[in-house]
Image: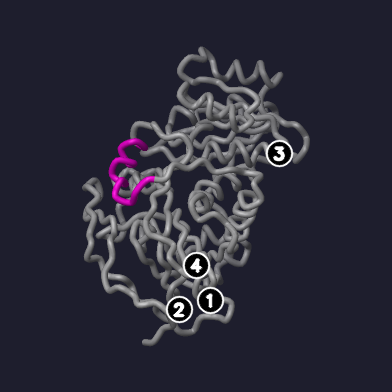
Amino acid sequence: MSFSTPLSLPKTQTAAVVYKQGGPVQFRDDWPVPTPKDREVLAKVLYTGVCQSDLHTKEGTAAGADGNPITQIKLPHVGGHEGVGRIIAIGPGCGDDIRIGQLVGIRFASRICRRCEFCLGGAEQYCIKSTNHLHHEDGSFQEYIALDTDYLTLLPDDVDPVVMGPVLCAGLTAYKAILNANLKPGANQWLVIAGAGGGLGHLAVQYGLAIGARIIAIDGPSKQEFVKSLGAHKFLDFTSTPNLVQTVCDITDGGAHAVVVTAGNHKAFSQAADMLRVGGTLSCVGIPPGKAFVETPVSVIVIKGLKITGNLVGSLKECLEAVELVRRGIVKVKVEVRSFRELPQVYEELKRGDISGRIVLKVGDDDYPSSKL
């Protein structure tokens, strides 16, 4: 099978490989470079974010829709779904809109059927036949990756590849959560963000501000200065505030219009709905390990007319909308760039909750000639 490329491609690459769930990350320098098949491209990975979902999948603690751990994953496992790369080879059958040198995103979803009710309805992240870079296909924790051009995330040429990776998962999920929070743009409504200093949370704060919401940010004391710098109107330290629910209700004169929980901790969900006013929306994002519950009586939900919604990333259209807000400088992604081989240390920091914003790993050099872009 022939493919098009102006470059000489290596046969092997470096990849961060996990051989069994709960096992360590092992860097393999002899991992095969894939050959792009029909309607595929080969991209050189430049940068990739590190998501909590990568950690939970590696550890075998990621919860599925039934609340049980997800164990049916491809092994050996190569994680990563917040990547940015550049197309360096094009397989047969690709359209004329695909060209060498384009920037592409490596997102959670890898392939969709384009025919089921969810794909046809613009909610293809729920495609019944979809595959993803977390459980089914090797992701962005490798130097080269094959991508399906029928569901390719083409990025504008002028975006910063350093910051754009986290937008493809954390940013998209945060953006979708704000869309689902039923807030009225420009109405100065109260929005609580639980986990406001994390990778998803700091973006949710900014997407909320972009629609004119007043933000109450909840996180630990080490995140206070950072979150306030984003423009949050109030900050509550969950470790020292005696009664978070009552404090939120006092600040908002009866409860917030919406609460977005980005923290992957069951405690953040337990009383989140109690912070809402009549008609408010709880927008759930973070997925705690195991079977976590929203501990709000049904009577409260019914009598107050509350709405509860979940947010599994978003569609490609919504992804590009989230990207555009970052491209225009309305939302700024806080990243700290580390070397690719620091992935194990980053996982340990994620376990401790020590990271503000997002860690981005530099995987490869962007050595494509700028004159050809």
Q: Secondary structure at mark 4?
A: loop
Q: Name the amino acid type tagged 2.
A: Ile
Q: Name the amino acid type tagged 1.
A: Arg
Q: Name the amino acid type tagged 3.
A: Leu
Dot label at residue 99: 1
Name the residue at 72% across, 31% down: 189
Q: Earlier in the sequence, mark 4 or mark 2?
A: 2
C-alpha gap between disc 2 and disc 1: 8 Å
The reply to whether callout 2 and callout 1 are in contact (CB within 8 Å) is yes
Instruction: Kindly report the secondary structure that dominates the magenta region of the rendered protein.
Output: helix
Dot label at residue 112: 4
C-alpha gap between disc 1 and disc 4: 22 Å
Residue 308 seen by the camera: yes
Q: Earlier in the sequence, mark 2 or mark 3?
A: 2
Mark 2 Cα-neighbour bin, 10 Å: few <14, some 14–19, many ≥20:
many
Q: Secondary structure at mark 3?
A: loop
Q: Is residue 358 above or below residue 304?
A: below
C-alpha gap between disc 4 and disc 2: 20 Å
First to last magenta residue range: 338-350
Mark 4 Cα-neighbour bin, 10 Å: few <14, some 14–19, many ≥20:
many
